[in-house]
């Protein structure tokens, strides 16, 4: 199915048409019906409250064509249709992946605070020499955006980035295992890099081991690792006082840590 937009010669290939196209109009949603005059937007994919619309698809197609240095105005209809047919399936896959990442982030409680968004706005204003809110709103209008649109886009991208970073973190025990396992003299210690992110209550990764399923060496290292991380300064926070670190380890007994390991560790005299 194709649609020629009013702006120039741009053909949209709706690869999901075979599944039925949902349309939103007059506050109601229908599926597979011819769009009436009051149609606001065609919804191609919906994951809970997040959607990919026909306009979203057109924008992504246009961006993909530009990245391939294809100008729709300088090629034939047949060439444009073929180019869109080639790129659209992958565009839809990526777009759906984004929605799933966004949904996962919301399930994990990721969000953008008002303070974070305010700092983002101030940075954008500074980089573009914009002095007043009125000038900023006017600049957004030129881009066919509102402040609400910008907030939604910023939050969406931030949540997706957080989920992706978490997924990378969750893969690193497996990467460490694959890198170190060929080294014979390190094999006896592989339980530590492979299992030190497992949690006593079974909510850890990469395998969701629980209790004594987690190798003892990894259970011990997990406590020491968290103690060292919290006791040390980071670019984004100062070191925790020893009393606060001790309280954290104690409260996480039976959830994050092996209770017996925590109790033994905290009996070790503090040399400081």
Image (cartoon, rainbow, N blue to C red):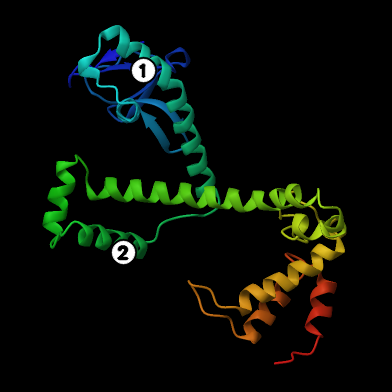
Q: Is residue 227 left or right of residue 53?
A: right
Which image quadrant: the C terminus?
bottom right
The image shows residue 192 at horizontal and vertical percentages of 79, 61
Q: Quadrant of the N terminus?
A: top left
Left or right position of 146 against 246: left
Name above or below for residue 244 compared with residue 79: below
Residue 64 found in image quarter: top left
Residue 168 image position (x, y, % from top left): 59, 49
Q: Nearer the viewer, mark 2 or mark 1?
A: 1
- In the picture, measured across the screen, residue 252 lies left or right of residue 158, that is right
Name the residue rendered at 40%, 46% in the picture: 156
Residue named by callout 2: 119
Residue 254 percent across, percent down from the top left: 78, 67
Q: Which mark is residue 84?
A: 1
Q: Nearer the viewer, residue 127 or 50?
A: 127
Q: For the residue carrying disc 1, how many other residues have a C-alpha within 10 Å: few (<14), some (14-19), or many (20+)?
A: many
- Residue at 13%, 63% in the rendered image: 131
């Amino acid at each position: 199915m194709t649609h020629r937009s009013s702006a120039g010669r741009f053909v949209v290939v709706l690869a999901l048409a075979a599944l039925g196209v949902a349309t939103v109009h007059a506050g109601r949603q229908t599926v597979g019906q011819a769009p009436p005059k009051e149609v606001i937007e065609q919804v191609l994919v919906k994951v809970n409250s997040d959607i990919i619309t026909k306009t979203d698809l057109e924008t992504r197609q246009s961006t993909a064509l530009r990245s391939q240095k294809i100008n729709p105005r300088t090629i034939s209809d047949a060439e444009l249709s073929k180019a869109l047919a080639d790129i659209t399936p992958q565009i839809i896959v990526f777009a759906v992946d984004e929605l799933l990442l966004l949904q996962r982030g919301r399930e994990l409680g990721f969000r953008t605070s008002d303070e974070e968004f305010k700092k983002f706005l101030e940075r954008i204003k500074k980089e573009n020499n914009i002095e007043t809110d009125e000038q900023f709103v006017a600049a957004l209008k030129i881009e066919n955006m509102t402040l609400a649109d910008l907030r939604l886009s910023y939050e969406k991208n931030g949540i997706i980035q957080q989920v992706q970073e978490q997924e990378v973190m969750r893969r690193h025990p497996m990467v460490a295992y694959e890198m170190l396992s060929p080294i014979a003299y390190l094999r006896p210690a592989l339980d530590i890099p492979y299992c030190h992110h497992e949690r006593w209550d079974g909510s850890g990764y990469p395998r969701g081991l629980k209790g004594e399923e987690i190798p003892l060496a990894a259970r011990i290292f997990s406590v020491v690792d968290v103690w060292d991380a919290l006791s040390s300064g980071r670019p984004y926070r100062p070191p925790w006082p020893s009393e606060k670190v001790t309280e954290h380890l104690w409260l996480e007994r039976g959830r994050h840590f092996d209770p017996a390991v925590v109790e033994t560790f905290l009996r070790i005299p503090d040399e400081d």
